């Protein structure tokens, strides 16, 4: 059976002609840390939660309050929504997660989805590369000053977002960044956050506070992943 992913919005949202950022982590914690930094810098509010019977059943407690490990944050002034997750999803969930994200984007008339994927690089190569699902998205990549990927393979949720976006004419941009694959990778988090802010008008990153946020976020993400590891091992047998 294909697992269902439910999105429960806690308020009415107005994101028409806006942006959606995919904050699901891939290699390391860079995507989650970069999006968490943007949330703290640009005054986002909790807009909903994302849950599934296939997700590990855990609660992430922050400031004494329980939280779903996968949540939606919104800034309606900037028209930006962020799917922030402390879970690294099993690959069996990548396709349905991407389709759920695209369906939510269509519902809210999102004009651009921004995702990211990591490449392990021990040398810490800082070059940011982009790939777009449509001609319009590829033009946005060039205007942002990112190198355009000519050949390559994009795995996981970002790859599915690109494929489905090309079929439905939904603008999707995937940023390819380099990371050591060990957290907290402050350098790659800062680079990714800055690249996303070039694509999304008004979004910004507080670089001085990013390192502190990276260290705090890494602790929470590691705890969430450790607590859910044995649950995932059991669930995905």
Image (cartoon, rainbow, N blue to C red):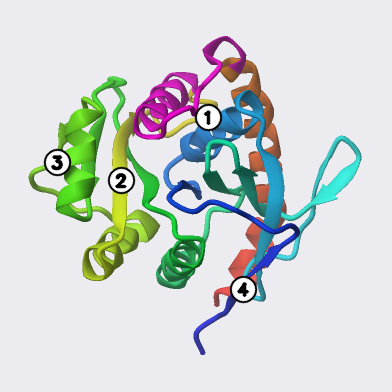
Q: Who's the residue at 74% across and 55% down the image?
A: 68
Mark 4 to mark 1: distance in Å? 26 Å
Mark 4 vs mark 2: which is more N-terminal?
4
Residue on which disc 1 sits: 183
Furthest residue in direction bottom, as rendered: 1
Image position of 210 with respect to 33: above or below: above
**Residue at 60%, 43% in the rendered image:** 76
- The residue to which callout 4 is attached is 54
Q: CA distance from mark 1 to mark 3?
A: 26 Å
Q: Residue at x 35, y 34 (%)?
A: 199
Q: Residues within 10 Å of mark 2 (few under 14, many from 20)?
A: many
Q: Are marks 4 and 1 in contact (CB under 8 Å)?
A: no
Circle 4 Cα neighbour tier, 10 Å, few/some/many (<14 / 14–19 / ≥20):
some
Which numbered dot is residue 204?
none
Magenta segment = 186-209
What x and y, as percent, mark residue 27? 42, 43
Q: Is residue 191 magenta?
A: yes
Majority secondary structure in the magenta region: helix
């Amino acid at each position: 059976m294909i697992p269902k992913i439910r999105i429960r919005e806690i308020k009415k949202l107005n994101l028409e002609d806006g942006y959606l950022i995919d904050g699901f982590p891939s290699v390391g914690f860079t995507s989650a840390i970069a999006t968490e930094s943007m949330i703290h810098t640009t005054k986002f509010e909790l807009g909903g939660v994302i849950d599934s019977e296939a997700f590990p059943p855990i609660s992430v407690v922050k400031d004494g309050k329980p939280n779903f490990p996968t949540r939606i944050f919104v800034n309606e002034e900037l028209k930006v929504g962020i799917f922030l997750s402390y879970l690294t999803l099993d690959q069996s969930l990548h396709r349905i997660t991407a389709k759920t994200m695209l369906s939510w984007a269509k519902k809210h008339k999102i004009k651009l989805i921004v995702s990211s994927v990591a490449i392990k690089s021990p040398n810490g190569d800082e070059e940011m590369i982009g790939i777009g699902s449509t001609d319009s998205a590829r033009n946005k990549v060039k205007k942002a000053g990112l190198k355009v990927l000519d050949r390559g393979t994009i795995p996981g949720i970002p790859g599915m977002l690109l494929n489905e976006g090309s079929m439905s004419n939904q603008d999707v941009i995937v940023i390819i960044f380099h990371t050591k694959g060990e957290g907290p990778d402050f350098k790659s988090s800062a680079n990714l956050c800055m690249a996303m802010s070039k694509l999304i008008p008004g979004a910004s990153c507080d670089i001085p506070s990013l390192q502190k946020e990276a260290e705090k976020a890494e602790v929470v993400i590691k705890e969430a992943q450790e607590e859910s590891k044995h649950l995932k091992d059991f669930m995905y047998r």
